[in-house]
Image (cartoon, grey):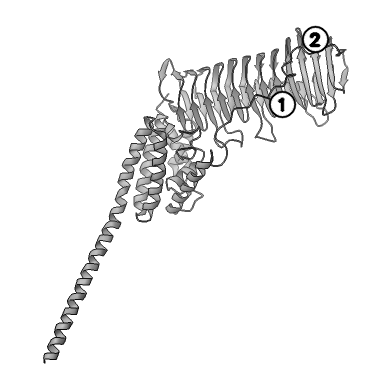
Amino acid sequence: MLKKTVTIILAAVMICSLAACSTSGSTNTAEETKTAITTPATLSDKNENKELQDTQAENKESTPEISENSSESSSDNETSSDSSTNENKDSSTNNFSAENRFSKRMHGNFNENNAGGTDGQTENNFPSYNGRQGIQAEEGIPSQNQDNSQQEGINNGKNIQDNNQSSSSVNLSSTAEKIDTSELFSDRDLDHSPDLSSAKTITVSDGKTISITEEGIYVIKGSAADCTIKVEADKEAKVQLVLDGVRITNSDFPAIYVVSADKCFVTTTDSSNTLSVTGAFKADGSTNTDAVIFSKDDLVLNGKGTLTISSEQGNGISGKDDVKVTGGTYNITTAKDSIEANDSISVYDGSFTINSSKDGFHSENDDDDTVGWIYIGGGTFNITASSDAIQATTLAQIDGGTFELTAAEGIEGTYIMINDGTISITSSDDGINAAQKSSSYSTPAVEINGGKLTIVMGQGDTDAVDANGNIIVNGGTIDITAQMSSFDYDGTAQYNGGTIIINGSQVDSIPQSMMGGRGGMKGMNGMNGMNNMNGMNGGFSGRSGFGV
């Protein structure tokens, strides 16, 4: 009996011991559970932190600190994503993308996203507008081409951020480097008074084709009808045609036709010269000769005199490589482009009076959209054009000059950079238009760093400065008179310096289009369904039609 009693007591002691252990384990588990539950509470702190960051950014304070906070926030999101629910992640994400980004787009203040550059892809690690998928991934929102896993979206965004820290763009360049002009113009390009002591003199005559096959300087004199000066020299030859009071009128073929040479110079003496074609151009075999001066190789125009060009059914000056103008006076009237080139147009100086039924200056290569830039360093330009006064495929860069431009669109290109100059534009469509014409840039942009720019817009759906991408204003004075829209952009707007005047009143930010522009059209896609995330982005632009 005693043995049984001892056994029962021992069993009771063991049971109590086990119960105590079990209670202790439950307490620990509860504490761990409590810790796991409270961890997602940091999301609210992060939302408050983001609001603080946005406030700091809009006040343009401490950009490097914003960059660090953004990185920390991204890191926190990755940490918390393992322990928080998808619902919490969606709530945190939507608060930032829908409210904060829409607010910034409304006010046109994107400096916090672009502290280190012009495309939103530098220190603060936000992908550019063109990379909307990148923004989706960064915010944890899967795009059409991504897996629906939100964690994968966050990881993709982190990868983009890492790439942005070592690269200025996600895919292609969103910014343009200034053209290096140190070697753009040679000494001979800039020599307006060549040595004529050993030059050969040629007098034009009716119905003649004057062939030049050797390198040298040739002085052209006289008057003729249906006469062509044809240059067909070695590919290494430099040929200089000095126009000295010459007048040529043709019915269907160029007055000057450069078939081959390393470079051909067309130089005017202190004289008046006239070249014209009155009818439709006829082809030379497989070559469509469509200009009064037509060159298949590099062409340079300079001198001290005046050259008047008339083309009743075609172009004025056409170069299939590079065209440079370093001096002289040019009066050009054309049915098509007045001065065009495949690869580039570079102007050092000169006086231009142009009346074109198409474009004034036009640079485009149908076979290569990575070329076709225009550089203007100085000169006087009075251009009236039915389409564009100045149109480039890639970069249009203006470093100086005085411009009076009256056209449907004043200046057009994929990237437009204005560094200096006095520019007056009267436009019936877009004063300045950055559109995607080249694969060299991921995002079209207008960048204004200096100069004095006056834009007067006609009635209707018009934009003084229109970018199917970004607008960056770092300096200069922009004076806009516009009944409808002063600025329209699909991407971001940065106002870092300079003066902006709209309808007589100075403003302190870049407003968005009243009509929503192209962004508004994309907004229709966004309203039709969330499948089209690009439409959602456009929707923000379209909705932000409260500015001028």
Q: Nearer the viewer, residue 442 or 486?
A: 442
Write the residue at 52% across / 20% down. Answer: 450
Q: Give the alpha-carbon distance from disc 1 to disc 2, as whole Å.
A: 24 Å
Q: Position of residue 58 (x, y in %)?
A: 37, 31
**Nearest the camera: 169 or 102?**
169
Give how far across and how far down residue 15 sits, in percent.
Answer: 19, 78
* Point 82% across, 21% down: residue: 239
Q: Which residue is mark 1?
A: 322
> Which sits in the foreground, 485 or 95?
95
Which of the image's four quarters has the N terminus?
A: bottom left
| Rendered image: mark on residue 244 | 2
* Residue 515 in the figure: left or right of residue 268: left
**Res 46 label:** none
- Specify whether 536 is left or right of 281: left
- What type is the residue that disc 2 sits on? Asp
Q: Residue 203 location in percent, x, y? A: 87, 11
Q: Is residue 87 above or below residue 390?
A: below
Horizontal arrangement in the rendering, residue 203 relative to residue 31 (left or right): right
**Number of other residues with Cα within 10 Å of mark 2, as a class: few under 14, some 14 to 19, many 20 or more:** many
Q: Earlier in the sequence, mark 1 or mark 2?
A: 2
